[in-house]
Image (cartoon, rainbow, N blue to C red):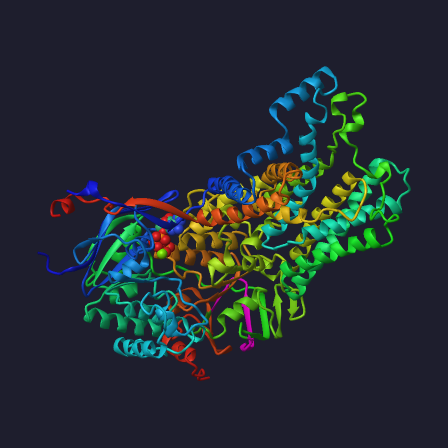
Amino acid sequence: MTEAINAIEMHSIVKRFPGVVANDHVDFACQVGEVHALLGENGAGKSTLMNVLAGMYRPEAGEILVSGKRVVLHSPQEAIAHGIGMVHQHFMLVPPHSVAENIVLGLNQPRFLLNLSHIEEQVAALSEQYGLSVNPRAKIWELSVGEQQRVEVLKMLYRGAKVLILDEPTAVLTPQEVEVLFHTLRDMTKRGHSIVFISHKLDEVVAIADRVTVLRRGKVTAANVPAKGTTKAQLAQLMVGREVLFQVDKKKAQPGDVVLAVEGLCADNDRSLPALRNVSLQVRAGEIVGVAGVAGNGQRELAEALTGLRRPTAGKMTLGKIALDRHTQWLKLGQQLAHIPEDRAVFGSVAELSVAENLILKRFYRPPISSGWSINASAVRQNADRLVVQYQIATPTIETPVRMLSGGNLQKVILARETSERPYLMVAVHPTRGLDIGATESVHKLLIEQRDADTGILLISEDLDELLSLSDRLIVLYEGQIAGEMPAEGADIHTIGLMMAGAKADA
Amino acid sequence: MNQLASSYRIRIETRLDNPGWTRVVSSILGVILALVVGGFVLRAAGATDPIGTYQEIFKEGFGTPADWQAGVTALLTNTDCPKGLLCFGPLSDTLVKTSPILLTALACILAFRMKLWNIGADGQMFMGAWAATAVAIFIFPPGTDRVLMLGVMALAGILAGFIYGAIPGFLKARLNINEIIITLMLNYIAYKWLEYFVVVGPWSIGDFESTGRFPVSATWPRLTEAAKSIPALSGLTAHPGIFLGIIAAIVLAWIFKRSRWGYEIRVIGNNPKAARYAGISLARNTLLVMGVSGALAGLAGMNEVAALRELNGRFQRGLGFTGVIIAWLARLNPLAAILVAFLFGGLLVGTQLIQPQGIASMLQGVILFVVVGTELLFRYRIRFEKIERVAIAPEALHDG
Ligand SMILES: Nc1ncnc2c1ncn2[C@@H]1O[C@H](COP(=O)(O)OP(=O)(O)OP(=O)(O)O)[C@@H](O)[C@H]1O
Ligand SMILES: [Mg+2]
């Protein structure tokens, strides 16, 4: 007899994808009432392993035990019937429907008639019980990302999940929302739930997890390490197999000419409501200007307006020496500068096209990639070969469609494309979201290198640590307006937090 | 151990990879399945021997090996073909039919690659035929040089098709009006347009509902014109128009694989948002792709009138829709479309004389249906598995 009961056990799981063994004889177990963190670099096979546990994928070999009994899971429905539920990183909700409707969607239970008000009551009771406050009648599109995540968790609880798998749940949350989530998770473990928690943020892992299992290249490299007494540095070492520097080395910035000057910029959001009000800012060559703010305060609209994806409603902009107003040709703007978009799968890449083809997305129209009307195949190949090596992109071949890459490697493809040409201005939005610490470290290094090569960088991020360690100057956005501006060195986190929450800078 | 007594069950799961072969297989499977289903329909329609009917269709569409052999011998010995028209007649007719449907198929492939659903190739083809006819009988005198005349007819067909395709392209690009409905409706306008000119209107000669025979310079040279020196070619109507289609297919394949424009089309077709991010103009490409798609169909129209040698009220409808089916069956691959169009040409020729009429359309419909269906199937994979199948760890076996 062991001291605690395993809620689930996985033995010797093997799962292959074309060209890779995503899980190579992986053993994994999660006890009743624990938070078990699953760590590993991008592409290590974490999501795959959990997809196997949640019935999304069938493993080629291996077995799964639930409460000690062997089960074969053919579908997520069968997994949930055994009490296993997963919240994916990309939520699977139907935006026009209400919270309650989404929660019963796909359930066999009410076969013909939906007694919605009854369900709403149940949902309300559940959310009360677990402290997951959300209005059951609200429509999904009205909710913030954090609230949507709560809906996903409620959905699984409603279906009776005892084991809850959370795949990078905090990547999209604000620090406040993370606190709320952790509170809920602790509450759930007290009630006998088990949580599998995937994250790249080691601080969070140390804070919430009981035990840690680490995957590297599809294999377990450390199993069931108690989180208590383990440091961030040790965890990092286990993950990447070498020491990781958490502090970014950088020299003092040498700001040069103004490369971006924005004056009185206004823009609407997707619902045609004003999202940016009268924003004025400057970025100089060779400096990183960080934009802080709680998600949804105009960051996305700012990035899109600057890169030509959104037409401003008022204001002026000077890019290098080109002056633009809302009547000029904005479309080609994106080609002039580097842009690391917020959503790498939606804007930054073309899923069905190969790595090589994605690497020319912004330069296919000019030499050496194209000559006249044609695209020079060997130049495309050389470009890809060079960048894959230089940026250490892990891909089976350069002909592999990018939809098969893990999140981190997809981000590297985008970074390679956007930074390899020494742009004079770069707009980077959440450049390390979802990246492992190794990759994050190299992205940070890259950004600093770019800066030192005289690129002006506007860095939009929700990660305050990242902003503070990379930026030379900081701007805080609140409700589409600039709430404050300060040098990053010596900036006080507390003051920034207040500004992000709407308090005016005490000038 | 009761492992041997385990039963099987069928599992359907989504396929994660979609290797190239699945497309080829599902196309071939689609055709075979369509023939089987068509066989039942034929039976229901009163044919006692569907397989015999298919054999008949094949013979009418392509000829028989014995006929081909006789033809080859005749060619080599420079004599008359012993079986007359039978030797190469079917193949020649099929090539004639292949030319326009290959071009309409390419028109569809180009648009479909960008996820623009141009189903107006029929109308664009009609407009191309109309414009080419205008050149043939009204603009140039009959004595014009043949190459010049055919060249200008082709240009006229291309231009008319381009304009007729660019109209829905413009509406889509500017006002985001659904191109499916517009292209479909424009077909009917084109039918009426042609009808007005050749049936009731100014181009009709007497009551013939026809423009009358074109001057020789406005018609494709046919193989039979060489019958004086090569007797075996006597009576064959095959003409060089097929090369227009083949060249267009090769050019299109190059465009998709190697050109800047093709790259833009593929990016847009896959992810329009990424295209915007990359500064690729959606509006310009929508207009251009619809226009060039229409131009290919317009060329098909020119090709067809130059082969018919007149424009009359019986100008065939539906070749544009056949193009849709070929495009789909060829999986939007221009080179594969050459082969598929040839097979469809044979189908169209082979079913001309077969009763009940309409077999060709019926089979086409069934093929499209089945191919789209099998494609869906290939997104999944069917697994037969024993219920007790999972690789079992030795310990687990012991305590069972
Ligand atoms: N559907 C798929 N088709 C093909 N290959 C895949 C698929 N899903 C994952 N892979 C491959 O399997 C490996 C493991 O991927 P997985 O998504 O499990 O990594 P991960 O540990 O979750 O990484 P990340 O931290 O970036 O999310 C990667 O090499 C990835 O490219
Ligand atoms: Mg993952």
In the rendered image, the vertical position of residue A254 relative to residue A122, given as above or below: above
- Residue situated in front as seen by the camera: A365 or A459: A365
Relative to A502, B120 lies left or right: right
Q: Quadrant of the N terminus of chain A?
A: bottom left
Ligand 2 - quadrant of the structure image = bottom left
Dominant secondary structure (helix, strand or loop) of the stretch shown in magenta: strand
Q: Would residue B260 be visible to someone looking at this image?
A: no
The reply to whether the magenta stretch includes residue A29 is no
Relative to B100, B5 lies left or right: left
Q: Would residue B185 be visible to someone looking at this image?
A: yes
In the rendered image, the vertical position of residue B233 relative to residue A29, given as above or below: above
- Residue situated in front as seen by the camera: A328 or A486: A328
- Residue situated in front as seen by the camera: B39 or A503: B39
Relative to B377, A221 lies left or right: left
Q: Position of residue A470 (x, y in %)?
A: 42, 64
Residues rendered magenta in the picture: A272-290
Q: Residue at x 42, y 58 (%)?
A: A444
Q: Where is residue A186 in the image (x, y as percent from the top left)?
A: 23, 71
In the rendered image, the vertical position of residue A14 relative to residue A176, given as above or below: above
Q: Where is residue A43 in the image (x, y as percent from the top left)?
A: 36, 51
Q: How many labels does the image show?
A: 0
Question: Farthest residue toward the top?
Answer: B77
Q: Where is residue A86 in the image (x, y as percent from the top left)?
A: 31, 62
Q: Residue at x 47, y 52 (%)?
A: A413
The reply to whether the magenta stretch includes residue A281 is yes
